[in-house]
Image: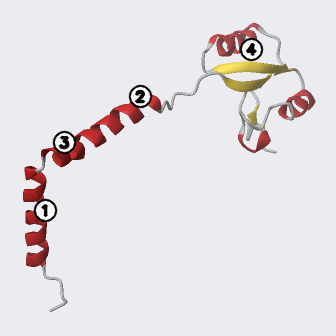
Amino acid sequence: MSRLSPSRILAVLQKEFIQLLRDRLTYAMMLGIPIIQLLLFGYAINSDPKRLPTAVLVQDQGKFSRSVVGALERSEYFSIDHVARTPAAVSRSKSSFSGATIRKGSPATISSPDSSASSSP
């Protein structure tokens, strides 16, 4: 007798839906609260990063490298905090980033302009 049968589960489920349709407040809450949460979380959570603290290694002072750095500065996605001329200066600037803005206290990857040489801490 203690065994659950699918017909008994469906009967209880049907009874609960009938009770739910009788109680308008519960029915409104069941529909309204998820819609409100969807709207709030959809607009409150922003996955578009803005003004990320950035350090740039520029070993070439040519027109192209200046235009790339300028485009990064004008972008609202990056905040150029350090423009380094040597890899040693990049190492020094990595330590000045705060742990609140970068996980684990330093940038994870630093890439050279040709992307063939990269170093990880």
Amino acid at circle 1: Glu
Q: Which residue is mark 1?
A: 16
The reply to whether dot 3 and dot 1 touch (C-beta < 8 Å) is no
Nearer to us of marks 3 and 4 is 3
The percent coordinates of residue 101 (x first, y second) are 71, 33
Q: Is residue 18 visible?
A: yes
Nearer the observer: mark 2 or 4; the answer is 2
Q: Along the line of sight, which residue is nearer the eye, 59 or 101?
A: 101
Q: Which residue is mark 4?
A: 65
Q: Residues within 10 Å of mark 1 (few under 14, many from 20)?
A: few
Q: How many marks?
A: 4
Alpha carbons under labels 3 and 1: distance apart: 15 Å
The residue identified by callout 3 is 28
Q: Earlier in the sequence, mark 2 or mark 1?
A: 1
**Label 4 crowd bin: few (<14), some (14–19), many (20+), radius 10 Å:** some
Q: Up-down: is 21 above or below 114?
A: below
10 vs 56, nearest the viewer = 10
| Amino acid, disc 3 | Ala
> Hey, which quadrant is residue 8 in on the image?
bottom left
Residue indicated by mark 2: 43
Label 2 or label 4, whichever comes before in sequence order: 2
Q: Residues within 10 Å of mark 3 (few under 14, many from 20)?
A: few
